[in-house]
Amino acid sequence: MLRIRLVVTACALVIALPVLGQVQTATLRTVPPTDPVLTPFNIPIELDHTVVFGLTGWSFALCHDATILEVIQIEEGPVLQTANGGDPVDFVSTTLVPGEGWTSGMLVDFFGANRLNPGDNLHIYTATYAPTSLGSTTPCFCEGIGEIPVTTWMLSGDAYYYPSYECPTIAIDGMGPVFLFRAGASASTYEFFGGHGVVCQQVSIEELETTPSPTPVSGFLMTLHHDEQLLTVLGAEPTPELVALNGGTEPVFWSVDLLTDGISIATELSTTGTTIEFIDSTPVALVEYETVAAAVQSQLATFESTLYWDDPSGSDNAVTTPSGDVTPAFFDGTVTLTPVFHRFRRGDCNGDATLNIGDVIHVLNAVFGIGTVPCLEACRTNADLFLDLADGIYLASYLFLQGPPPPSPFPNCGSVAGQDCAIADACP
């Protein structure tokens, strides 16, 4: 199921539905913030409706002025988690249309057995916006945006209804620095037989509006959470962009706290005034995870898991600037895990389940195109991207001169993403 990740605004959508001689109504409401908008802000979206037979689904688009606002993300409200007979709705799709707005489609139940029942103040989304300039703007429902132009309707059974709109105005009265913590997306593999897999996730920071000038940053605190049933966090390292600070001596303070369901990273760049500017999306941390073997072992499925930021109030996430700590906006990340089935032991070039001089000879034969290789990756004994004389020398050094052992997978069998190794007997 696709997950929501986009916007909303300050609009109300009113629908009149004639059913059994009565006018039934629905109001889709977005409530603008009451305080002056300075930094990223949330807008809850609520739905009131009295449709007797319930709503089956909807489609709508919502446009905004991209010169004043930028959409950060949309979270599903509690109603969408329970509308399908106590379970999440079967289908939710939201797509950002850069520079225009976003589109949303929802279907409660593929089979039509469950519907969104009548009620007031039904919390369906929470949207996060970031102001990018001063002024007033009126985000409102619209038609025709998206790669496949979206129209707006609500569905009850097999009847479509076309709503009217009410759209309040949001005033951007002032602005402070607006930072975005972004977890991004990564893809990795796990061993079908053993369940082992490793994921390296890049985390970045971006200042969304740098006019009139970028904001110097001297440190940050971030907390990123994961599904502990699927992943275990191993640690985090600063990226080359941070390592290059202070003459290449890394940040003066880098602290990592491993949590059961997440990781907290705190850093101070320097004690001498060194700062960094996040004009573009800049990687700041590489977070490493491993799979929970028992959860994925012998599973044919591709798993997708969300990496999500902690408390939006900022207690666990902040950017340190000359004017004080700034609460960032957030963009969650995803990890996609795909099973791999072919296992090998690095160095076992001839595939006989042992490492000896025969494997050294097999590597050298392979370099010169002699004979067959059951698993090319097993012959790359130093684990670089090439098969050459260095691999034969590396393996011989390990076997006879107490040199370093072959990199993983070794000494146990394992797999490498993208490698198709036809070894069956050597690695049960």
Image (spheres, rainbow, N blue to C red):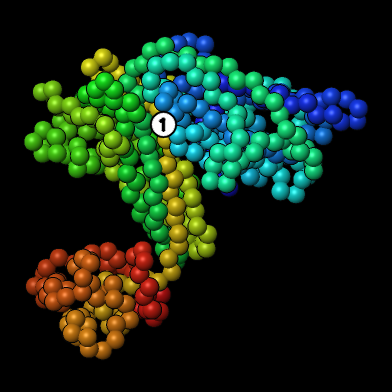
- Image coordinates of residue 43 in percent, x first then y, are 53, 22
Answer with left or right where residue 111 lies relative to residue 71: right
Asked if residue 127 can be seen in this view, the reply is no
Residue at left 45%, top 11%? 36
At horizontal 36% and vertical 75% (from top left) the residue drawn is 421
Which residue is the extreme one toward the right? 21
Instruction: Give 148 or 268, whichever is nearer the viewer.
Output: 148
Foreground residue, 306 or 398? Answer: 306
Q: Amino acid at mark 1?
A: Phe
In the rendered view, would you say 231 is above or below 414? above
Residue 406 in the image, given as x and y percentages of width and height: 21, 67
Query: Going by the image, does 269 lie left or right of 50?
Result: left
- Please rate how many residues cluster around mark 1, counting C-alpha atoms within 10 Å: few if below 14, some from 14 to 19, many from 20: many
- Quarter assignment of residue 415: bottom left
Query: Vertical placement of 212 versus 227: above or below?
Result: above
Q: Quadrant of the C terminus?
A: bottom left
Q: Position of residue 334 (x, y in %)?
A: 44, 45
152 is higher (above) or lower (below) than 122: below
**Residue 329: image x %, image y %?**
40, 27
Q: Quadrant of residue 63?
A: top right
Left or right placement of residue 325 versus residue 387 in this view: right
Residue at horizontal 33 percent and vertical 49 percent from the top? 200
Which residue is under mark 1? Answer: 330
Q: Residue at x 28, y 35 (%)?
A: 280
Q: On the rendered structure, is 101 left or right of 167?
A: left
